[in-house]
Amino acid sequence: MRPIQMVDLKKQYNKIKTEIDEAVLGVLESSAFINGKPVQDFANNLSIYLGIKHVIPCANGTDALQIAMMALGLEPGDEVITPSFTYIATTEVIALLRLTPVFVEVDSRTFCMDPASLEKVITVKTKAIVPVHLYGHAAPMDEIMAIAKKHNLFVIEDNAQAIGSDYYSSDGKKGKTGTIGDIGTTSFFPSKNLGAYGDGGAIFTNNDELAGKMKMIANHGQRKRYYHDMVGCNSRLDTLQAAVLNIKLKHLDEYIKARQGVADDYDKAFAGNTKITIPCRAKYCNHVFHQYTLLLDGVDSPHSYRDGLNEFLAQHSIPSMIYYPVPGHRQKMFEHFKSASVDLPVTDWLTERVISLPIHTEMDNDQLNFITSKVLEFVNR
Ligand SMILES: *Cc1c(COP(=O)(O)O)cnc(C)c1O
């Protein structure tokens, strides 16, 4: 059996090596390392794939969130609502921009923003909502968009973990996650579902005005070279990464299917076990399984039980991860915010119980069987 990794990027590369090597060599030959043709090609290809008017490539998924928030014309102290149960990037940029993060509860089944809690934390200072499509499962966008509309708030979807996921609106419309709110953002960090061979990110919108502004912000606030209308930043997707992404985008749907296949097998193995809750797949979306995350419950001290499984698997050379061990509202960096002292029982409950198993596009059956047998050995002993 090959060694098990959380994500197997090497085997995936080997399968598309000819295509990738040719594209990378093409960039080296052209030596247009910044803003070469593959960058615009990739923006166009991704906009077609997502069915969105504008795709603005940038340096990483954190920058994408920052540029999106900078474009909204918010004032220091304005409140931005986001889950505490997410990767730190989502919440960090809010504070970085001198805005106030307001943490909201998530649903215990979908791990995503809970609309009922959302409505409760809206104040006169609230300006934007940032739902996160965590682990590859969409947040309930119908409800979130309705609340945003009612209170006149912007919505930025953090789509870093769910690129390619379909969302089925209650009105019968089907669209990709990240294209439903005012702005969507994503990351091409190598381990993401659409991963580059280095850092990368992108911002999506159907709004022409916001698109123009975000392009300017990502490029030192300039509309015309050396004429800077506003303070911006320097955030680019480099040509090598765009060349790689152009090839990987063609495989994205097949990569998603491979991940879903692994999830199906895990589901089958764990179904009915009283200590394991398998990931929920709400009917309104197509879970793309950036992570396969179990909930361990039905034991006296779930936190140490979960950590025990993590260690037990490690002893058998099976990696597993806790995403994330400390939720936003308990991070030191947010200590001085009033919103950090809120009560988020579901978030805390989940934090003690989640564990993510290896999932990627190159999993072999013997690896899968070994992982499931070891998980079951631990919970059934
Ligand atoms: C990965 C990730 C980001 C940040 O992306 P980087 O490219 O690493 O900056 C933001 N939000 C979420 C939910 C992520 O998973």
Image (cartoon, rainbow, N blue to C red):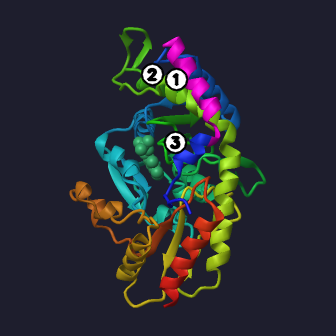
Taking 250 as reference, is 25 left or right?
Answer: left
| Residue range highlighted in magenta | 15-31
Query: Of 219 and 304, which appears nearest the observer?
Result: 304
Q: Secondary structure at mark 2?
A: helix
Membership of 19 in magenta stretch: yes
Query: Within 10 Å of the Cα at label 2, are there few (<14), some (14-19), or many (20+) other Cα atoms?
Result: many
Q: Is residue 128 above or below residue 216?
A: below
Q: Secondary structure at mark 3?
A: strand
Query: Of 237 and 10, which appears nearest the observer?
Result: 10
Q: Earlier in the sequence, mark 3 or mark 1?
A: 3
**Quadrant location of residue 252?**
top right
Amino acid at pointer 1: Gly
**Quadrant location of residue 332?**
bottom left
Give me the C-alpha separation between circle 3 and circle 1.
18 Å
Amino acid at pointer 2: Met
Name the image quarter holding the N terminus: bottom right
- Give residue 216's mark: 2
Q: Position of residue 280 (x, y in %)?
A: 62, 70
Q: Earlier in the sequence, mark 2 or mark 3?
A: 3
Mark 1 CB near ligand 1 (8 Å cut) = no
Magenta-colored segment: predominant secondary structure:
helix
Mark 2 CB near ligand 1 (8 Å cut) = no
- Give residue 186's mark: 3
